[in-house]
Image (tube, helix red, strand yellow):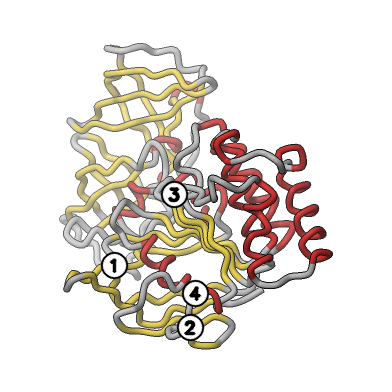
């Protein structure tokens, strides 16, 4: 196992700076997911750690040792790529053990590691096939097997599931979790898919425009987003962000006045008596149908919500709604049978709402 430290990392391509003063620590055995939109710098970060790109400035440490000038083959890192990167003329067995053979490993060690990896990944009956005879999921298993047998200090995953269909992605996520529990190898996983980030990561690092916006365990990121970007990027459907005005005892959204009981702590921020403009955040999952909600001190009522569209999602139904002249999403269970064009009353748990600065996007109470 290994620890990784990125210290004040800058990276530029042809004068264009894509990483800005990046700092990140990954401890022994941790599974960290870098997530963000395309172009945010997450794959570049991974390639810097692997040694496939050179840093412009800053230091990369593995096991407390600077590796900036160390060639990739000496960093003892195994990388799983998006496009599998298998040798088409070699069979599964040969693809998996190729790195061990080049390193001069003994036949006994190669056989032992091949047997264990192929058993874990369900490849025992596929060892004589070539990549062209495999499905996408099987090819990705082979790529993971090649990483496993290396006995590397660090596993790096660069969007390995993006070429798979939804069912295979779900299955492979389970495989990756199981492998990490088996080996506890320090791992960094890059994805633009927030579902992968939330299900795989012990720690999630949200990136945008070459910087880290927020990091923490998945539920911290989901429940306490640092800013509007994180709030809307993490979660599906994304958080509703509404124009509102915050007062010491309530928040005003259009003509709706939602009382505050526990949320606002004036020790953290000045809230004048005449109020201040904010962006008000509510996740669709935290709405409740007023007809099925018991009265509680932390519940506020939003009345006469117009339903524009209803989408069935199995147990849940997703409602596109209008309230206070603003569009929102609400996810309710099957008890809510109201249809398009009707109005309903909703309740929201005010302890689960967020107040953002309209200029900086910063969460005022995180």
- Whichever of callouts 1 and 3 sits on the residue coming sooner in the sequence is 1
The answer to whether residue 306 is above or below residue 153 is above
Tell me, yes or no, whether the two marked residues, 1 and 3, touch with CB atoms within 8 Å: no
Q: Secondary structure at mark 3?
A: helix
Along the line of sight, the residue nearer the viewer: 203 or 59: 59
Quarter where residue 309 is shown: top left
- Give me the disc on residue 70: 2
Tell me, yes or no, whether the two marked residues, 2 and 4, touch with CB atoms within 8 Å: yes
**Within-10-Å neighbours for mark 3: few <14, some 14–19, many 20+:** few
Q: Nearer the viewer, mark 2 or mark 1?
A: 2
**Which quadrant does the N terminus fall into?**
bottom right
**x, y (%) of residue 224?**
43, 56
Q: Secondary structure at mark 4?
A: helix
* Residue marked by disc 4: 72
**Within-10-Å neighbours for mark 4: few <14, some 14–19, many 20+:** some
Q: Secondary structure at mark 2?
A: loop
Along the line of sight, the residue nearer the viewer: 349 or 24: 24
* Residue marked by disc 1: 269
* Residue marked by disc 3: 351
């Amino acid at each position: 196992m290994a620890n990784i430290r990125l210290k004040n990392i800058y990276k530029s391509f042809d004068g264009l700076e894509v990483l800005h003063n990046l700092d990140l620590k990954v401890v022994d055995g941790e599974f960290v997911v870098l997530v963000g939109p395309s172009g945010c710098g997450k794959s570049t970060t991974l390639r810097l750690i692997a040694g496939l790109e050179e840093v412009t400035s800053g230091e990369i440490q593995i096991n407390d040792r600077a590796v900036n000038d160390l060639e990739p083959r000496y960093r003892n890192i195994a990388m799983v790529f998006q496009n599998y990167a298998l040798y088409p003329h070699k069979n599964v067995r040969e693809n998996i053990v190729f790195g061990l053979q080049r390193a001069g490993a003994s036949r006994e060690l190669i056989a032992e590691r091949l047997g264990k990896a192929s058993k874990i990944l369900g490849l025992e009956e596929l060892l004589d096939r070539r990549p062209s005879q495999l499905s996408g999921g099987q090819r990705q298993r082979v790529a993971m097997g090649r990483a496993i047998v290396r006995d590397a200090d660090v596993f790096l995953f660069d969007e390995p599931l993006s070429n798979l269909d939804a069912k295979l992605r779900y299955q492979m996520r389970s495989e990756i979790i199981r492998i990490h529990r088996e080996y506890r190898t320090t791992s960094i996983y890059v994805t633009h898919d927030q579902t992968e980030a939330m299900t795989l990561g012990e720690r999630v690092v949200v990136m945008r425009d070459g910087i880290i916006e927020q990091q923490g365990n998945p539920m911290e990121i989901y429940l306490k987003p640092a800013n509007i970007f994180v709030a809307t990027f993490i979660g599906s459907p994304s958080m509703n962000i509404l124009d509102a005005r915050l007062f010491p005892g309530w928040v005003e959204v259009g003509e709706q006045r939602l009382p505050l009981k526990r949320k606002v702590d004036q020790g953290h921020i000045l809230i004048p008596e005449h109020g201040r403009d904010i962006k008000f955040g509510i996740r669709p999952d935290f709405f409740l149908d007023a007809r099925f909600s018991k009265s509680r001190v932390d519940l506020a009522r939003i009345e006469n919500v117009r339903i524009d569209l209803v989408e069935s999602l199995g147990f849940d139904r997703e409602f596109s709604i209008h309230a206070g002249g603003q569009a929102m999403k609400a996810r309710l269970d099957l008890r809510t049978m109201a249809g398009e064009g009707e109005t309903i009353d909703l309740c929201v748990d005010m302890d689960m709402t967020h107040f953002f600065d309209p200029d900086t996007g910063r969460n005022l109470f995180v």
